[in-house]
Image: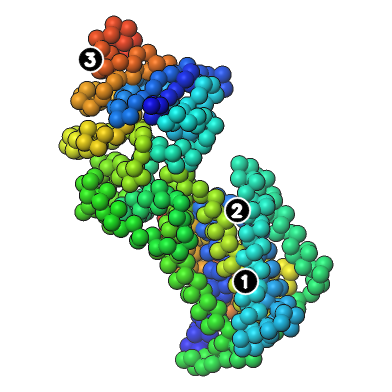
Amino acid sequence: MSTVVLLAVTGLGLGALYFLVASGLSLIFGLMDVLNFAHGALLSIGAYGSWWAASGHLPGAGSSGAGFVLAVAFGTAVGTLAAVVLELALIRPLYQRPREQVLATVGVGLAVPALLSAIWGADARPFPGPHALSGTFGLLGARIPVNRLVLVGAALLVLAALRLFLGRTRHGLVVRAGVEDRAMVTALGIDVRRAFTLVFAIGGAAAALGGALGGLYYGSVDPGQGTSLLIFAFVVVVMGGMGSVAGAALAAAGVGLVQQFANYYTASGLGDLAVVVLLAALLLLRPSGLTGRLA
Amino acid sequence: MAPVLHLAGVGWSVGGATIVDDVSFDVREGEFLAFIGPNGAGKTSLFNLISGLVPAGRGSIALDGADVTAEGVAARARRGLGRTFQTSSLWPAMTVADHVRLAAQAADGGSYRLWRRAAAYGGQVARVLERTGLGHRADAVAGSLSHGEKRKLELAVLLVGEPRLMLLDEPMAGVSAEEVPALTALIRSLHRDEGRTVLMVEHHMDVLLGLADRLAVMHHGTLLALDTPQAVMADATVQSAYLGEAL
């Protein structure tokens, strides 16, 4: 029983990390038809920004208490800024050229980890998290790492904030309509490019927060972290349905749980294969993903 | 006073094929101009040119005296040009009220504050939904509406923006025979009671004869005739080219 509880909470923690990356990716694809292969780079930027700040380089930031919160906020802000710059400088000029757009995001996705390696080296760097978050607590006989709960809590907060934004605000209404039919939004006289930039900023913020909290989950940051998480984020987006935040949340939890249980009960590494099998099975049964949006 | 819409020698070709050729006419304020013609005559393409969905290859288009030939669809919409489409142009997963709310905030573009609640347009939305007979369906998702209700919702989306010029592309398409009279009455009321300027493509001649001030007949991308419905119906050229076999 305790093993099942531990695997479930750990799986949900991993799913939370996937959700933070996939939610923005899903909105970006749903609204803008942009396959953003640079999204993993935004996660890496957030991770390194938080690591840099928490390591004492940013005045006021540190590895514990309010200093750690500031470090995470700094990493998230840097990732958000990078997303906005990416959209304005690279994605926007290429809206009418989707192939070049994909190539450009692939290029950024490769260049950012290389740049991080060049500055801080290719080896993983220990992530200086608060002592309180590195411990464990008891739940139904299992010892659960505290940082898993932090990840799940952050993902739930981001999910609630995104649903509030999409459901209650004017820009949220534009984004929802744009995800369904962008041309019709334009026909109403709405400058949908503003929504593009906003969605990129939101997606970048969520991914960068995922990067910062991923540092807690893995205990370290390395230049390739974003790229490896991006693969599973794409799986989550396809399973959840393009443009659906709720679908991404459901799929992320499913992928995290399947990975953890398959890795434990079969052989280490088979979790990744199980996720691919799950994706194939879902697409055979429901080609439009969990929420019925076309993948 | 400049006409609401002015077209001068407008044309559009694709890959050497002429879709719309040398179309010129004016539409004055409060007028109802209906377009008829066989499938492929260029009616919807002409609407696409007027609304800016496709750029005119030749000629010029002016709205309220301002040349908009080089402007895109969003810019023309902001000038007060509203349009419905031949096939349903709604967001199936969004509610009826959300549709009208989105159009209301689009029309209110100047005060586009980030965190202003979408619910801020409640009164405006309710009024337009009552006007179009959709008040009781405000919370229904668009995908669940009947064809007639969908057409009414498309009109509501237009109306909330108080358009100067409404382009209705086959608003009766797909609508059941029972729903046609109510939809016709609504369109008639928008024109006669509210004085709105309307351009409409429609195949139902019985609908048009009670609505239109003038009839435009399109054939092979050109404007074959443009006159009162009675004059057009009596025109021998029109009868031999189109009306005889198509209607």
Give coordinates of residue B181: x percent, y percent.
Answer: 18, 34
**Quick one: SS at disc 1?**
helix
Residue B36: x, y in percent? 32, 21
Which residue sits furthest top? B236
The picture quadrant where one finds residue A164 is bottom left
Please say if the residues under marks 1 and 2 sit with CB atoms less than 8 Å apart.
no
Please tell me if label 1 and label 3 are on a single chain: no
Residue A128 visible in this rendered orientation of the protein: yes
Residue type at mark 3? Gln
Tell us which disc is closer to us: 1 or 3: 3
Q: Provide the secondary structure element on which disc 3 rests.
A: helix
Nearer the observer, A39 or B181: B181
Which amino acid type corresponds to the residue marked 1 in the rendered image?
Thr
Decide if residue A287 is in sight here: no
Upstream in the sequence, badge 1 or badge 2?
A: 2
| Relative to B138, residue B237 above or below | above
Q: How is the image coloured?
A: rainbow
Of the two numbered discs 1 and 2 in the rendering, the one whose residue sits closer to the viewer: 1
Q: Which residue is mark 2?
A: A35
**Residue at the location (75% across, 76% down)?**
A124
Instruction: Name the one closer to the observer, A187 or B62.
Output: B62
**Badge 1 is on which residue?**
A76
Residue at the limit of the structure toward the front, as seen here: B1
Which amino acid, by three-letter code, is at mark 2? Leu
Element on which disc 2 rests: loop
